[in-house]
Amino acid sequence: MGEFELIERIRSRAAPGSGVVVGIGDDAAVLAPTPGCELVVTTDSIVLDRHFTADWPGSNVGQLAAQANLSDLAAMGASPRWALLALTLPAIDEAWIDAFLDGFLAAAGSAGMTLVGGNLARGPLNIGVHLVGEVPAGQAVTRCGARPGDRIAVTGTVGDAAAALSLGEAASPELLDRLRRPRARLQAGETLRSSARAMIDLSDGLLADLAHLLAPGQGAELDLDALPASAALLEAVADPVERWRLQTGGGSDYELLVVLPPDADLDALSKAGGVALTAIGRVVEGQGVACRSATRAVPAGLGRGWDHFDDD
Amino acid sequence: MGEFELIERIRSRAAPGSGVVVGIGDDAAVLAPTPGCELVVTTDSIVLDRHFTADWPGSNVGQLAAQANLSDLAAMGASPRWALLALTLPAIDEAWIDAFLDGFLAAAGSAGMTLVGGNLARGPLNIGVHLVGEVPAGQAVTRCGARPGDRIAVTGTVGDAAAALSLGEAASPELLDRLRRPRARLQAGETLRSSARAMIDLSDGLLADLAHLLAPGQGAELDLDALPASAALLEAVADPVERWRLQTGGGSDYELLVVLPPDADLDALSKAGGVALTAIGRVVEGQGVACRSATRAVPAGLGRGWDHFDDD
């Protein structure tokens, strides 16, 4: 199969979508944006042995590629619209590509997003995803806007992906699923758009990502006892201190970390967003993040964040 | 230098631009599209040993990455607005990255395009570029629209990049420049928007790209004697038949191949587009491309197009 057959194969599998004036197959795609909306654009590359390993099924790679990018749109409160896929492949492996598309297109479809174009090149495996979302003008949620006294909350549960990485082959299917089949919190992001002061998705680790939400002169108090843990994490990691390390330092959870006004109604937001929203701390004047627990001593130097150029 | 320092370095070098609500440094960029316009989006990956070699200066790699993508916008008649850069790097080499940015940002600046975000990952070198352009609604030029009797024209000159590849170290600086420092024909693309029936940029080779402009039941007559050649090509390749091979089969010229109504005023379009537009053939009923010459015998099987998965 050559380049043009592969493009035709991808084109035939991509579902039609709204706002697509010219889709796959021309020099570029032409899209009709919604009047009154701003565009929210993001890109992310998924690399072998960094974000996934050779033993991953292609469908999981496709799912991760889509969801990691969708998570960035969720963090802005945006609604996904269109996707471009830049595939650099060492060779054309039809079965792998089909499996990859299974995962990618399923994730795109459930997010209401249409694949409208992309690029193929030959080289070491690299999966580039480029998304265009929309948000009503002026309503995008950025990382800036936290005020002292605001509450810090997180969607879902944290630490599963880090536990899966840490446990390796001993990880339970539930934990592995969080690593390989994350789900961007799109509904929660759109719901939180109207009340969030600041928001980010958890990709580098809770403490590292929280630091991005604090302005100079701001710090945070984090209640370790409140960190939401899944049943799978509680079962796999019995030691609470070890759990804290995974929950505060591990990346790839793709949950939303959000700063809300003190009077925000977390129950109502949880219901509307389709996922539990748990208060885990507070923005304060000062600097740094103070980790607190009412139940046991907090070890010094809880996990640090994930730098994509770290060697470990 | 870590990931965050590198992002900050890139951010500090990117010029401010219009329509940027949120730029580099958040989960995604937020952009204000122009009312009445459609979006034109494209992505392209530049890969070591496919599109460039290790001996290229970083600034040339940056320039190629920008121009190859800008050329896709030019081919739609679009105006560039915003760029995202997905860099996968084996390590952080500050000097190389600065040189790369020199080339990329210079090309972006002269195209009126702002770098608004991107992604960094560690892995085998891969440069992903994602562009968002705009075009007045309904005016994008696609590959479809040619009619029998239409004229086929090309901007600038063709064959230089192929000659540079073919000659290797023996290539003149002028030829090398066409390969490493192509210039997307943006002004010509915008000018041709109002009269072009169909348009494509020359990236895979003239015959291969021309085939994309012909509908089923359409063919073309191509006048080999009319193919515009640069002085550098005429000097480097004396044999006209060998020149034809390079001009019809070689890729990476990044000129525009355009189908125009029979009565189009090429002189006026050349003047407005800032580059010579040369008539090289005609769309006919039938199929295939007939290569003609009034001066010498045309060899069978003139060069084929470039498939990014070919081994040669």
Image (tube, coloured by chain):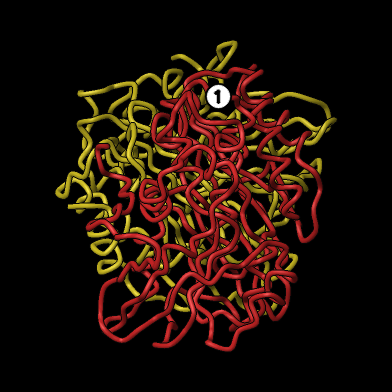
Chain colours: A red, B yellow
Screen quadrant of the C terminus of chain B: top left
**Front residue of B41 and B196:** B41
> In the shown orientation, is residue B139 left or right of residue A73?
right
Is disc 1 placed on a helix, strand or loop? loop
Image location (x, y in percent) of residue B160: 37, 34
**Front residue of A175 and A190:** A175
Using the rendered view, name the quadrant where residue B195 is placed: bottom right
Can you say whether B21 is above or below B8 in the image? Answer: below
Residue drawn 74% across the image and 71% down it: A272
Residue lying farthest to the top in this orientation: B300
Using the rendered view, name the quadrant where residue A144 is placed: bottom left
Q: Which residue is mark 1?
A: B305
Can you say whether B300 is above or below B291 in the image? Answer: above
Amino acid type, label 1: Gly
> Which of the chains bears the disc numbered 1?
B
**Front residue of B109 and B4:** B4
